[in-house]
Each structure stands twice: as C-alpha cells, then as structure tokens.
Image: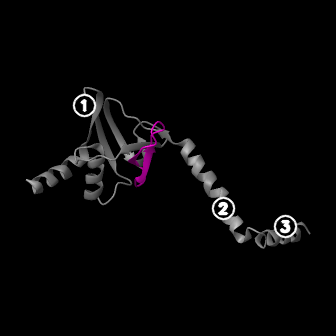
Amino acid sequence: MLDAFIKERIKELENGPFGAEIWKMVNYEKEWETIQSEVKAEVFKPKEGAYIIKIVEEPEETFFEDKKDGSKTPQLKIRIRVSGQDKDQAWYVSKGKTSRSLYGQLIALGKGENGLAGKQIQLLVKPSKNQAGQNTNDYTIVEAIKYLKTTEEKVN
C-alpha cells in the first residue's frame, strides 16, 4: 500500500511544474561519496628531506582559488601514499612553466612512463631562496631525471 502511494507521489512530482528535472538536481549518493573522499584525504606538504611516494591514481586537473583576489592557479591533484604512512594523501602541485619545475618533472615522467598511476617515485626536497629572496623549496623526482636529460639532448 505504501509502495503504491510513493509511486503515485513520484508521478505527481514528475508531472508537476519542475517535471522530471527535479530528479536531476542533486545526486546525493555521488555527492556524499565525493565529500567523504575529500574529508578523508590529508594534504601532503613535503618539507626538507627525501620521500618514497606511490602514486595511487592518475592526477586530475584542478585549481587553487585565492580568497583575497579571486585569482585561480591551475594545479594537479594527485592521490599518493607516502612510504611509512597508512593513509592516502592529496598532493597539490601548481602548474609550472619549465621542465625543471615539480610540475614539469611529473609531466615528463608521466609522458615517459605512459602514465603515473601505480608508479613509485623518490622525491628530494631541498630548501632554497627564490629571486626575491623568499624561502622556497627545490624538488627533484629522481625517476624523472632520465626523461629530462633526453628532452634536453634533443633541444641542444
């Protein structure tokens, strides 16, 4: 009896002013899964040192939105597992402009290895200063070096 009432009510809603579109507004199950995956992901912010990292899945393109001026910076979001850790983490890498940037190294490695998912990398982080004298980090992905050298040899 209740099932018949629910089915009748659904038909009324579908034929109402919003029609079947009302059911396309929010996929709660999908949205809940998305929220849960975002909540569980800790953010990886490497400090000085060496890391062994497994890339769990292919990177996805996203952006960082600056709350002060609304500007958007393109970046990659990569799900990783750092050696010695028991949880996956999200690693955000801003889009770089050179092959030597962390972004450029990841792209070179992904191109050379036909993807990044399932790959294990060694990340070396060394503190440095940028041209303005601000503290920053230099990143080296050991496995990307051979692909960067190949690219440089073709250019020279």
Q: Which mark is residue 130?
A: 1
Q: Secondary structure at mark 2?
A: loop
Amino acid type assigned to the residue bearing label 3 in the image: Ile
Q: How far apart are the alpha carbons under marks 3 and 1? A: 64 Å
Q: How far apart are the alpha carbons under marks 3 and 2? A: 20 Å
Amino acid type assigned to the residue bearing label 2 in the image: Met
Which residue appears farthest toward the front when viewing the image?
69
Horizontal side, residue 110 vs residue 131: left or right: right
Neighbours of disc 1 within 10 Å: few (<14), some (14-19), many (20+): few
The nearer-to-camera label among 3 and 2 is 2
Q: Position of residue 99 (x, y in %)?
A: 22, 48
Q: Position of residue 16 (x, y in %)?
A: 79, 70
| 65 in the magenta segment | yes
Q: Which residue is mark 2?
A: 25
Q: Which residue is mark 3?
A: 6
Q: Earlier in the sequence, mark 3 or mark 1?
A: 3
Residue 18 position by quadrant: bottom right
Q: Is residue 41 above or below residue 25?
A: above
State the extent of the magenta-drawn residues as a range.
56-76
Amino acid type assigned to the residue bearing label 1 in the image: Asn
Horizontal side, residue 126 vs residue 55: left or right: left
Q: Which mark is residue 147?
A: none
Q: Position of residue 108 (x, y in %)?
A: 25, 53
Kindly identify the residue that appears in the image at 66 percent across and 65 percent down.
24
Please name whichever residue, 30 or 51, is drawn nearer the observer in this view of the structure.
Answer: 30
